[in-house]
Image (cartoon, helix red, strand yellow):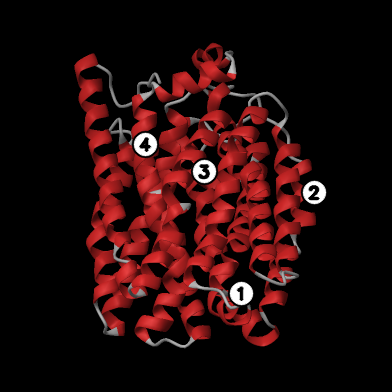
Amino acid sequence: MHSTPGAARLFHGPGGRALLVLTFINLFNYLDRFVVSALVESLRADLWLTDTRLGWLMTSFTIVYALASPVFGALGDRRSRPPLVALGVFLWSAATMLSGAARGFFTLLLARAAVGVGEAAYGTLSPGLLADYFGKDRRGRAYATFFAAIPIGSALGYIVGGLVEHRFGWRTAFVISGAPGVLLAYWCLRLPDPPRGASERPWLELGKRGLAATYRRLLANRPYVLAVAGYAAYTFAVGGMAFWMPAFLERSRGVPRAIATVQFGAVVVMTGFAGTFAGGFFADWLRRRRREADLWVSGIATLLAAPLSLAVFLTWRPGLYLSALIAAQLLLFASSGPINAALMNVVPPAERATAAALSILAIHVFGDLPSPTLIGVLSDHSSLGRAVLIVPAAILISGAIWTWAAWRGERAAALAGAGPGDDRAA
């Protein structure tokens, strides 16, 4: 099932309706995930939490999210996907609301971990659904639209969380953030499940294997492994920055709490929306000329973001660090659509849910699972201003891996005599 050609008609047909629903749900996905970041200082004071324990709130979510993803990936390659997604949406929304009833660190930790179960279903299955709705010629634009919801939802998590907490308290902020889940789950149930790889028939037989064989195939797929490795470093940096940035602005730059969350949220909205769309559309345009367009866009944008992110943490003048933050975030978000398109393009359609699950497991286990806690531990032993300096280093590593993977892929294609439009084997 594919929507009709042309960017102007991206939302037409079954694929367009699914894109609209999944994008809207993705917005609330990230709102629920990052509302806790806006509440860090209130949770710290009310529940007497150290920075290490605050970091564990995100880490517990990430552990469960990563471990549950392969389960939903295996189910998604063999069962109807919309009901599984609907179940996940309902679970994460209920767990977010229950976070507001927490009476201490461990009850809050369990509630945030439960959010990870629900979000694992959605995060694992949605990219494959979109890949089956949209052909490769417009997949970058579809992913750009889908992933544009990430900065908007994340920013709303900061803004809604900060404003509601300021007026009504952090418990109410959790309840309001999770409440829309029932409607969202119902919308998921009404989505059709498209045929897997309908426009990519040569791939179909490759996916008819057992789960162990699928994992072996993915781990032997070098383009896939390199893309995931760079994504892990990227997620390490972005996860650490997303969790600690409001607290950094308050402690290290003296920005009042309510202003810090709204200020960072506003930056995320502006840069995320523009950067995600620009990255996706530019990658689709570049694909006519460069075989590894998605990796080139992701790699170069991320390399450029590394020195800018360092400037964010080393400069004190508001005009300088805010300008650097805007530029760095713009470039980081430009990578989100292309890198996910790259991951889906190098695996068989019948294995996309499993490939997405394995990548989710890897990027979180090596990415934003350790980074919030590691930054918290370093902060407890030194200062938050010093602890966050590991973020630019991770961004640099990510960009270097993706750029090298792009060069390597085009060199191998040139030796094989393949052109920019040729399909790749995994």
Q: Residue at x 60, y 53 (%)?
A: 26
Q: Residues within 10 Å of mark 4 (few under 14, many from 20)?
A: many
N-terminal of the pair, mark 2 or mark 4, is 2
Relative image position of residue 121 (x, y in whole percent) = 65, 42
Badge 2 marks a residue whose secondary structure is helix
Query: Which is nearer the eye, 154 or 362?
Result: 362
Q: Which residue is mark 1?
A: 161
Q: Is residue 231 visible?
A: yes
Q: Which residue is mark 2?
A: 186
Q: For the image shown, how many numbered marks are present on the structure?
A: 4
Distance from label 4 to label 3 (Cα)? 19 Å
**Is there CB contact under 8 Å for labels 3 and 2?**
no
**For this view, does 405 lie left or right of residue 178?**
left
Badge 1 marks a residue whose secondary structure is helix
N-terminal of the pair, mark 4 or mark 1, is 1
Distance from label 4 to label 1 (Cα)? 33 Å
**Is there CB contact under 8 Å for labels 2 and 4?**
no
Q: Which residue is mark 3?
A: 142
N-terminal of the pair, mark 3 or mark 1, is 3
Q: Which residue is mark 4?
A: 227
Q: Residue at x 50, y 64 (%)?
A: 55
> Closer to the camera: disc 3 or disc 2?
2
Q: Residue at x 59, y 68 (%)?
A: 35
Tell me the quarter of the image containing the N terminus.
Answer: top right
